[in-house]
Amino acid sequence: LFASVELAPRDPILGLNEAFNADTRATKVNLGVGVYFTDEGKIPLLRAVKAAEQARLEAAAPRGYLPIEGIAAYDKAVQELLFGKDSALLADGRVVTAQALGGTGALKIGADFIKRLVPDATVAISDPSWENHRALFESAGFPVVNYRYYDAETHGVNFAGMLASLAALPAKSVVVLHACCHNPTGVDLTTEQWQQVVAVCKEKDLIPFLDMAYQGFADGIEEDGAAVRLFADSGLSFFVSSSFSKSFSLYGERVGAISIVTQNKDESARVLSQVKRVIRTNYSNPPTHGGTVVATVLNSPELRAMWEEELGEMRDRIKLMRTQLVDKLAALGAGDFGFVKAQRGMFSYSGLSAAQVDVLREQHGIYAVSTGRICVAALNSRNIDAVASAVAAVLK
Ligand code: LMR
């Protein structure tokens, strides 16, 4: 049965964790996967999460099956984070939300549902995009193409190229957009640019699919929701996948959601019924723990304030690491990396080549994605000097 099974390549991001874990060098640094570490190099257990978990433990709640679409209080809290508490869409019943297994699970539910709706659709992802976007939509049966996005010369967006690519897509193509903190480049659109993207999606009858894995890591919860809010105001039907892996530091709990904006309440009821079928035939219904914790935090004014403060601390520490890295590289004569300060979220597209990334790993024990993406959120006061020196050495 398995005689002709070929060995699959390691995952370009999670495969790095496997290699990192097997590395015995004490000085190794993992800048590969998108995980926030504290200045002590630890994945934090947020204070708000700990308080919610303690309350949950004390309540000793039974673990019955959740509804297929997850915890109602969780789904509602997700909607308010994405669309705003006073959103007209929410009041009109135009948003369907289902708890999902992280952002990846949300993307997959959305992809499987779209495959049933528009089986011949093409999916367009940014060039470059999160490695798993292409793999995930291809495995859902779609052809995946790139739209122009990153401009390596300017370390910015090739916006004219992006608009032209989008305008050239066939009607009913799915356009995967990074709502904030673009992964891997850290380069986001301005509000004016988002308005033009909304207009092109409308004019060309495209299906926007916004991926929101880093809300709160650029400027703040509300600010980072700006692109979602622009689409919400556009009258379009669209998809949003969202995740609490990073913002709640709940990576292993797989807490995410798929939200689908419809035209009216009646459509919402029908869409939800179909999304439930997709979920039921994949994993039946979601797990209880992470969703309960997030719902508890978001629905308690005190815990929510605590969480926002902690999210702010993470955001500020990442920004500090960006500044320090740029300064240290300049001091080492490695060149002007000022663009790293303007990038947003956890990642920096450093400009290092795949060959340079190999040298970083092999000679210095520093792990980065082969595209040159480094996770700035894994830098700290203990490893940043070694990282800066290694990058400078690799560039010489
Ligand atoms: C990343 O891009 O590193 C994260 O989103 C983790 C993952 O699942 O790839």
Image (cartoon, rainbow, N blue to C red):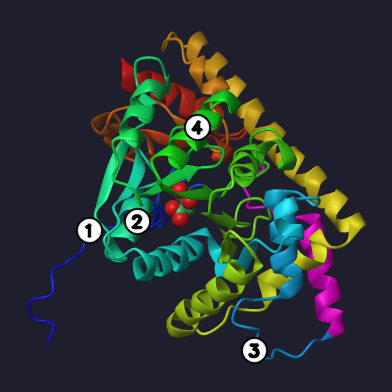
Residue type at the position of mark 2: Gly
Residue labelled with disc 1: 9
Q: Earlier in the sequence, mark 2 or mark 4?
A: 2
Residue type at the position of mark 1: Pro
Asked where in the image residue 147 lies, by quadrant, the reply is top left
For label 4, the crowd category at 10 Å Cα-Cα, with few meaning under 14, some 14 to 19 and many 20 or more, is many
Residue labelled with disc 3: 65
Q: CA gap, disc 2 to disc 4?
A: 22 Å
Element under disc 2 = helix
Q: CA gap, disc 1 to disc 4?
A: 26 Å
Residue bounds of the magenta highlight: 38-59
> Residue lying furthest left in this view?
4
- With respect to residue 253, does 217 lie above or below? above
Q: Nearer the viewer, mark 1 or mark 3?
A: 3
Residue labelled with disc 2: 15
For label 1, the crowd category at 10 Å Cα-Cα, with few meaning under 14, some 14 to 19 and many 20 or more, is few
The residue nearer to you, when weighing 256 against 205, is: 205
Q: Earlier in the sequence, mark 2 or mark 3?
A: 2
Element under disc 4 = loop
